[in-house]
Image (spheres, rainbow, N blue to C red):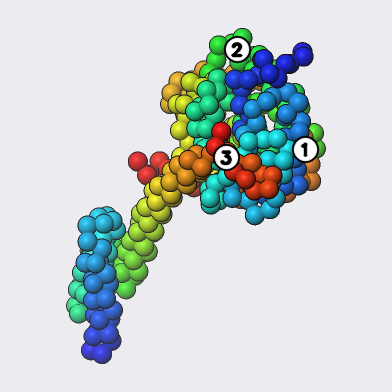
């Protein structure tokens, strides 16, 4: 029971984070929400994992949870990687805009001028 | 052929992306300056003297506020050159591997062929000091590119290229780092640009080998290309 309460508190922290994301990162948000909800079920009704595992041809419920966790983690990492790329693109455009705005520079004595 | 820099090459812009190339950039600019008046160095937030040395050598220098990568530097240079009315844009490496004497030939061949861009090919031309392992890696990359893009190329990762303004304005590089070379080839296919390959000479020095791509970079390029596909 103690472990279940501690794990549930941890998941509640995750749930708070998911809610705090608001409308950003919709896919990541839904993925995390699914993980949290499934986590609650598996923590309080562990025998369900065994039934699911048997249903899909995996020996133990613990194995099923681990496989699902790995898959979800990889998916979320991929989504975050893509999101990071998008932000890098935005940053690149901004940096390029600043660079072109500033114009070409002259090195002698540090003076600068647009061309 | 004798080139008059003022009258014949005023619409040609040589774009040189540079990151911490202070050791060689001055010499490269001096050589380029003997043939072409418009030299634009994009200093990708170098931490050495690249900016000062390039400026002192006579190049115009744009400086990124943060390090973005070679692909991003090229796109910045292309944007600037187009805004200055460039008719041809040449991408040229800062590490001294390229020979400026090849560029007039590429420009001539491009004009004669009516193509949109000319790509340098070391395998049609000559290599000096290239290791066997790099040759194998580049050959493998070229084979992979031929299979994935359908473009009949002999050298897919050569940084020496000449674009017409029309081609340069169509190729909007989003790959900031090494994968931009593959992105250019994908853009050629996407926009149905006509290209020619021109034999060029690539000289490998200890310096350029140290700065060049490694076997592991091939995986980074592959990852970036996959990620770009998933992004849209």
Q: Quadrant of the N terminus of chain B?
A: top right
User: In the rendered view, would you say B118 is above or below B174?
Assistant: above
Residue at the far top in the pictured view: B112
Chain of the residue under the numbered disc 3 shown in the image = A
User: In the rendered view, would you say B97 is above or below B223?
Assistant: above
Which mark is nearer the camera, 3 or 1?
3
Chain of the residue under the numbered disc 2 shown in the image = B
Chain of the residue under the numbered disc 1 shown in the image = B
Residue at point 68% right, 25% down? B37
Residue B111's disc is 2
Q: Quadrant of the C terminus of chain B?
A: top left
Residue A113's disc is 3
What whole-number distance in Å separates the C-alpha atoms at marks 2 and 1? Answer: 29 Å
User: Residue B50's x, y, as percent?
Assistant: 68, 47
User: In the rendered view, would you say A75 is above or below B180?
Assistant: below
Residue at point 69% right, 24% down? B36
User: Residue B86's x, y, as percent?
Assistant: 55, 23
- Mark found first going from the N terminus, 2 or 1: 1
Q: Same chain for the residues at labels 2 and 1, yes or no? A: yes
What whole-number distance in Å separates the C-alpha atoms at marks 3 and 1? Answer: 24 Å
User: Residue A1's x, y, as percent?
Assistant: 23, 89
């Amino acid at each position: 029971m103690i472990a279940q309460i501690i794990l549930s508190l941890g998941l509640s922290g995750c749930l708070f984070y998911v809610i705090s994301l608001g409308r950003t990162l919709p896919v990541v948000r839904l993925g995390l929400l699914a993980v949290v909800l499934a986590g609650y079920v598996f923590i309080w009704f562990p025998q369900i994992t065994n039934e699911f595992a048997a249903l899909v041809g995996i020996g133990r419920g613990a194995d099923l949870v681990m496989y699902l966790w790995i898959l979800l983690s990889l998916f979320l990492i991929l989504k975050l990687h893509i999101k990071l790329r998008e932000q890098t693109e935005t940053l690149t455009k901004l940096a390029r805009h600043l660079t072109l705005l500033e114009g070409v520079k002259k090195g002698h004595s540090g003076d600068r001028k647009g061309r | 052929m004798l080139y008059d820099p003022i009258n014949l090459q005023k619409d040609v812009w040589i774009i040189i992306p540079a990151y911490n190339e202070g050791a060689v950039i001055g010499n490269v600019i001096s050589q380029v300056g003997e043939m072409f008046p418009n030299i634009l160095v994009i200093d990708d937030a170098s931490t050495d003297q690249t900016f000062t040395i390039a400026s002192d050598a006579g190049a115009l220098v744009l400086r990124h506020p943060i390090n973005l990568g070679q692909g991003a530097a090229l796109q910045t240079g292309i944007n600037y050159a187009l805004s200055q009315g460039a008719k041809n844009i040449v991408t040229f490496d800062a590490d001294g591997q390229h020979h400026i004497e090849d560029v007039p030939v590429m420009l001539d061949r491009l004009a004669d062929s009516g193509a949109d861009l000319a790509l340098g090919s070391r395998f049609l031309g000559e290599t000096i000091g290239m290791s066997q392992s790099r040759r194998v890696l580049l050959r493998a990359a070229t084979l992979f590119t031929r299979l994935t893009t359908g473009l009949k190329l002999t050298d897919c990762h050569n940084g020496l290229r000449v674009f017409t303004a029309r081609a340069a304005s169509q190729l909007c590089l989003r790959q900031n780092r090494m994968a931009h070379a593959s992105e250019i080839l994908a853009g050629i296919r996407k926009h149905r640009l006509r290209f020619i390959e021109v034999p060029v000479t690539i000289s490998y020095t200890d310096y350029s080998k140290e700065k060049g791509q490694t076997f592991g970079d091939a995986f980074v390029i592959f990852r970036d290309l996959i990620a770009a596909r998933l992004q849209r």
